[in-house]
Image (tube, helix red, strand yellow):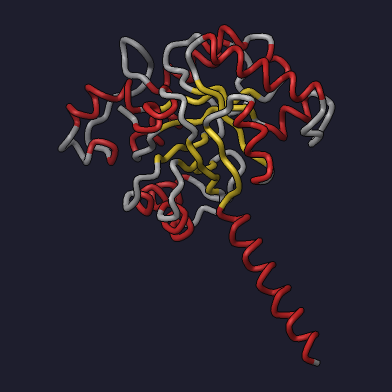
Amino acid sequence: MNKLKEKLSAGEAVHGCWLNSGSAINAEIVGKAGFDWVVIDLEHGIGTENNLVNQLQALSGSETVRIVRVEALVRQRVSRVLELGADGVLFPQIQNAREAEQAISFMRYPPDGKRGMASMVRATDFSQNFKKYYDGYRENVLGIIQIETLESLNHLDDIANIDGVDVLFVGPADMSLALGIFQQWDHPRYIETLERVRDAATKAGKATGTLLRNKGEYEKYYKLGYRLIGCGSDSVFVFQGALNMARELNDRHAKIK
């Protein structure tokens, strides 16, 4: 079973970040840093499918679980990222149970779904471990549905109860924008939304997740019951590191002039 699924089922917190630069080297560095999971972002990230396979290869040297956020609810796209070796798929902008069911169906082979069949792919070690992959893919592939629109809030219970949906993931920027309280993270309407998502997931025996705006929010979301907790991205890590170093060098120079 996917180790992330096991930990989430046990109520453990699992920590991750975004990979949005498209860089395989950044992916390798982040993978060796100790995160439980990463999201390779094909929706808003710079990288494309051409970069994806290199990032997945770079992450093979670590135990980090590899999740890919697809940019569209398209069967071929979902099949493609799974065949390349993704351990899970994050689906953005899901509006209702019908779309969530469609998303999960794209992850599953017939008769349970609509995923196309191919054995000579990277996920099966190019057919060497096809049977093992096929027999265990339902338990091993993580399905994550993003809750980030007003419409999705009207269907929380239905979405959460779909077999194959493992996590309801609140997209903070889009959700706060949809609520008309953009980036007001302590606004009562936003907190109420977080609680509604958590309650729906808990009733269905599923987990909740989100992306922190900064590490200082950790205790807040943990106490709210969120367990798939992300913070930062490879681009942010590089930018902040470079910015802090440049400022420190300039400050030290100014003091000795």
Whether residue 75 is visible here, answered yes or no, is no
Q: Foreground: 195 or 58?
A: 195
Image quadrant in which you'd find residue 150: top right
Q: Foreground: 120 or 201?
A: 201
> Where is residue 247 shown, x and y percent of the image?
73, 73
> Where is residue 76 shown, x and y percent of the image?
43, 28
Q: Could you tell me which residue is drawn at 45 percent across and 51 percent down?
A: 51
Count of marks placed on residues: 0
Left-right relation of 144 to 198: left
Please state, as top left, top right, bottom left or bottom right, where the N terminus lies in the image: top left
Q: Could you tell me which residue is drawn at 32 percent across and 18 percent down?
A: 109
Please state, as top left, top right, bottom left or bottom right, where the C terminus lies in the image: bottom right
Left-right relation of 219 to 227: right
Left-right relation of 204 to 246: left
Residue sitting at the far bottom: 257
Q: Could you tell me which residue is drawn at 69 percent across and 67 percent down?
A: 243
Q: Is residue 171 placed above or below 39 in the rendered structure?
A: above
Q: Could you tell me which residue is drawn at 38 percent across and 37 percent down?
A: 86
Q: Is residue 206 placed above or below 244 in the rendered structure?
A: above
> Where is residue 208 shown, x and y percent of the image?
55, 24
> Where is residue 206 shown, x and y percent of the image?
49, 17
Whether residue 121 is visible here, answered yes or no, is yes
Left-right relation of 132 to 160: left
